[in-house]
Image (tube, rainbow, N blue to C red):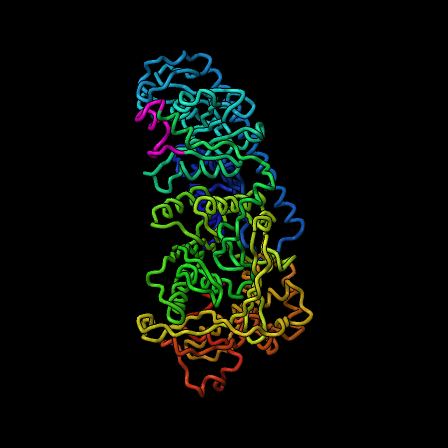
Amino acid sequence: MNDLAELFDAMEARGLQPPRHLEPGKRERFPDGGKTGDKAGWCLLFPDQKGAVFGSWRGGWTESWQAERGAPMTEAERAAFRAMVAKAKQDVEAERRAEYAAAAERAQKAWETAAPAPDDHPYLVAKKIDPDGLRVASDGRLMAPVHGPDGALQTLQYIGPDGGKMFLSGGKMAGGRFAIQTREDGPLVLVEGIATGKSIASAMPDASVAACFSATNLAAVAKDLRAKHPARNIVIAGDDDTRTAGNPGRTKAELAAQEIGAQAVFPPDGGDWNDYRRAHGIEATSAALKAAIAPPKKIFTPIGELLAHPQPVDWLVNGWLEKDTTAALIAEPGRGKSFAALDIACCVALGRDWHGIPTKQAPVLFLAGEGRAAMVRRACAWSIVYDDLSDAPLHLSSGAVTLNDPDALAIMQGEIDAMPEAPGLVIVDTLQRGLSGDENSAETMNGFVAALDTLRQRYGCTCLVIHHPSKATPGEPRGHSALKGAIDTMATLEARDGGVIVLINSKQRGSDTAHPMPFAFRRVQLPPAWNDEDGNPTESAILAHCDLPSAPAKPERGLGDKQRLALSILKRIVAEHERNLLQIGRDATAAKVQLSDWRKAAKDEGLDVRNFSRWASALEDKQLIAIDGVFVSLGNSSHSSSSSFEENEEPPFYSSSSSHAFRREESEEGATSEGEEGKNPFLANDEIIEDVEI
């Protein structure tokens, strides 16, 4: 893949539709989000074609992109790149403001010359609504004003006699609203469309009602009005799009309500509130709204009232995971996070004790960001050793779901709603794969946390996020602190001697932390149906509870955190090369890695590789690696000092009579054969740990 192909992939991943040719130095405009007639998407490819800035006017976001370079940038080059990015953003913002201003001026002129809408306009008659506040264009279309937060006219919506809608070209829609009915007190009701808003206004004469024109725009208007009316009872009267994939009307209404602490209400019959009013009349609509809208929640509750109604802890996994909470499992790559998460998922799905700890049976959704095939093999191994999963309500995703993308979340919720039972546990593996944007951004991480809150509130489920630790603070989650603040339960995985990993409950909001859980990796041979194309047996692995080792495994002495992580990355690459050599019958000790591949992998892991040469020299001085020209291999001391099972150490294995697929002769149980000492047995089989980030 060349550099520009990566740029196009990055833009298309955000929903943009760029042309296949970009002229360097010229800002291109193109569609965003499938709207082929618009020009909301844009990109500026820098003259050297090594960097670019792109974004969406409609979405209000920008991103920068930089091509992979053969050598690190100098400080002067980095400064120049930052300056080009800043200037591109300033130019785009200036152009956008100018276009919005011109559109607002055209809208004002068109509005001033238009006549009031007649009562008998076909659209008004069909929807059974009044013409108040609307006008009619010379071509017979209705005109509705779109006002900004400051009350100024931003643009216009045109509605044809047949109900077709469009907005004035180039106008600003974000944050726009049409105030249908204004009251000093009473609820403040936000809706999508004008017909819905007018129907609610007639059914709730004491309420203020505003149309936001689209489900996507509900949140922006809601946040603005919450800031202006902090004590007002704001209600999102959403559309229930039961016939649309993902039900975007309901999903985005609930998201908007959640963001501002409001409530979302929907018609009992589905559809929108105008549909309900036309079907049942004003009185029935008024009664339905009154029944759906709860009084505003009080901020304070007397302590006596709380003490009179005790709420015992409702555990999903006793002492570890409470129902309707957010949890995180934090560990370095290669430590076994996905194994632990799958182990918990299987136990909850079956209502089976988790290694002696009671669970409550509930359906489980496992969002597997990568390595789905390896996950299925692990589930098969678990089923062989522990219990049959054939009929378990455990659902594995086909890939990652970017939860902070409202459209992706809506599609997922639509599929969940169609399931016979709501999930009790949702596992996101990993946060990086389930997130769109920069995890260090407050906006991005808050959007991710808001999505988790939506799932919890909608289904009453526990959300377990698999994530990596901060490089600065290893025991804390990586990324913006919004995630840390939202976590009720946090667990970490610690490597111990003998290949044992220990699950440690480092945070339990409102309860004592649970006792550590030690595990060893156990190899399991899968049934013949899982053999590879050559008929060779396939093996996978599961976690087996074991005794707790006395002390943590010692990392390489004298290494900094970045050097240690770089070495860990190299070990994983070498392990994969060793596996490949073994499969073709060659000596695994000949495994070497190109320095450039190691450097790229370190960069992909998030390391700042400007000091890469210094790290490599330090590791070579300690004889942990050996550099031969453009190649690097592991030193002898590095092979014997691994800190996780993935890094060439021998994990313990346990045999059980309950497993018909994993049996070894007693003579093999306690010793390794010649040439196998120090080798990770996973790497010599078809099931390799590197298939999936764990």
Location of the N terminus (image quadrant): bottom left
For the residue pair 51 and 662, the one nearer the viewer reads as: 662
303 and 421: which is toward the camera = 303
Q: Could you tell me residue 331's position as x and y percent? A: 56, 61
Label tally: 0
Looking at the rendering, the stretch of residues picked out in magenta corresponds to: 266-283
- Judged left or right of residue 122, residue 116 is right
Position above or below: 164 against 599: above
**Percent x, y for residue 380?**
37, 67
In the image, 433 versus 85, the foreground residue is 433
Question: On screen, 643 above or below 45?
Answer: below
Q: Is residue 143 left or right of residue 604?
A: left
Q: Quadrant of residue 280?
A: top left
Q: Nearer the viewer, residue 14 or 345?
A: 345
Where is residue 101? Give x, y as percent. Answer: 53, 23
Residue at figure coordinates x 33%, y 34% from the top left? 269
Q: Is residue 270 magenta?
A: yes
Magenta stretch: includes residue 531: no
Looking at this view, name the residue that lies furthest to the right.
558
Q: Is residue 377 visible?
A: yes
Relative placement, left or right, of 223 versus 349 is: right
Where residue 200 sits, quadrant-wise, is: top left
- Does residue 178 lie above or below 351 as drawn? above
